[in-house]
Amino acid sequence: MSKISSPSISRRSSRRWVYPLISLFVTLGLIGGNANISAAFNWRDLILPGIQVIQLTSLSDKQEVALGGQINDEILKQVELYDDPEINNYVKQIGARLVPQSDRPNLPFTFQVVNDDSINAFATMGGYVYVHTGLLKAAETEAEVAGVMAHEIAHITNKHALKQMRQRIIAGGLADAAGVDNNVLVAVGVEVGLNLPRSRRDEYEADQNGLENLIRSGYAPSGMIAFFQKLLNAGGGSMPTFLTTHPHTEDRIANLEQMLQQAQINPNMGDGLNQNQYSASVRNLR
Ligand code: ZN
């Protein structure tokens, strides 16, 4: 896979930015080698200025978690967390069941419930996953919530936000030979997390990996499909926020169904389909 791939950037403009950065990267690599990161760390010290952009998708887990934490600090200035401990624990429990079966089981994940009635969930990087109360209210089973969360976890395990940030920084000319300013980096991360739609390819990848994770975790895979279908049917006026940042839902449902069919997996085999149990688990939602 090439270091930089972006359908949204013209070949000419990507070359313009990428080549000087690559040569700088190589030069610094030759001079400095790979510095070992000691225990106490500060984001600014972790990455040499000027190679941040090219290195965004090859950060260590520690670096990625640190950047995700900085982006989280900014996101928490824009959203309100839901304070009910029972609801928070419930979402964390679902996450704790999914993460060990994900493609990055050792990454520390942080699951947070956002007090917002729009139907949405999103993820940034370094394990930060956000689930709206509106999504928990719209769901009817735990398998549906787990399906969406598995999809968001897969965005993180595949570093989709980091790749998108890199594209955005390059396309926007936000980096020069001296690198990208930390504040700009965080601001772009917030924008990618909250507002920008993922690409079709990223959505398919998150669906596929998410579905696999869901099945390995013992949840009924029909949950994921049922929830996406629910979003499509919601219609009637405002489109659920989730659909604007996670596009191509109709095709993706067909794709998920095909994956299950090919693997000869019964979509209703697994846990999390009991509606009464789910209602009891989220009874504190108001
Ligand atoms: Zn998505």
Image: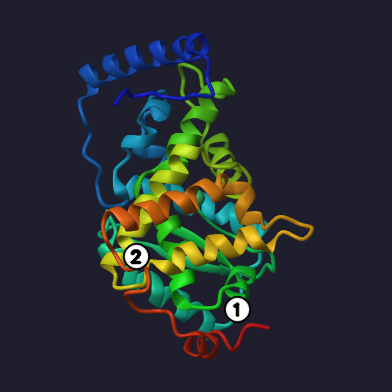
Q: How crowded is the residue under tag 2: few (<14 C-alpha within 10 Å), some, or many (20+)?
A: many
- Residue type at the position of mark 2: Leu
Q: Say if 174 sits above or below 80 in the image.
A: above
> How many numbered tags mark residues here?
2
* Residue 275 x/y as whole percent: 51, 85
- Residue type at the position of mark 1: Asp
Q: Nearer the viewer, residue 33 or 121?
A: 121
Q: Is residue 127 visible in the rendered structure shown here? A: no
Pointer 1 residue: 83
Nearer the camera: disc 1 or disc 2: 2
Say the numbered circle drawn on residue 214.
Answer: 2
Q: Is residue 218 visible in the rendered structure shown here? A: yes
* Residue 282 x/y as whole percent: 55, 84
Identify the image quadrant of residue 59.
Answer: top left
Q: Does the CB distance between marks 1 and 2 fall below 8 Å? A: no
Identify the image quadrant of residue 263.
Answer: bottom left
Q: Is mark 2 within 8 Å of ligand 1?
A: no
Q: Nearer the viewer, residue 181 or 231?
A: 231
Say the numbered circle drawn on residue 158.
Answer: none
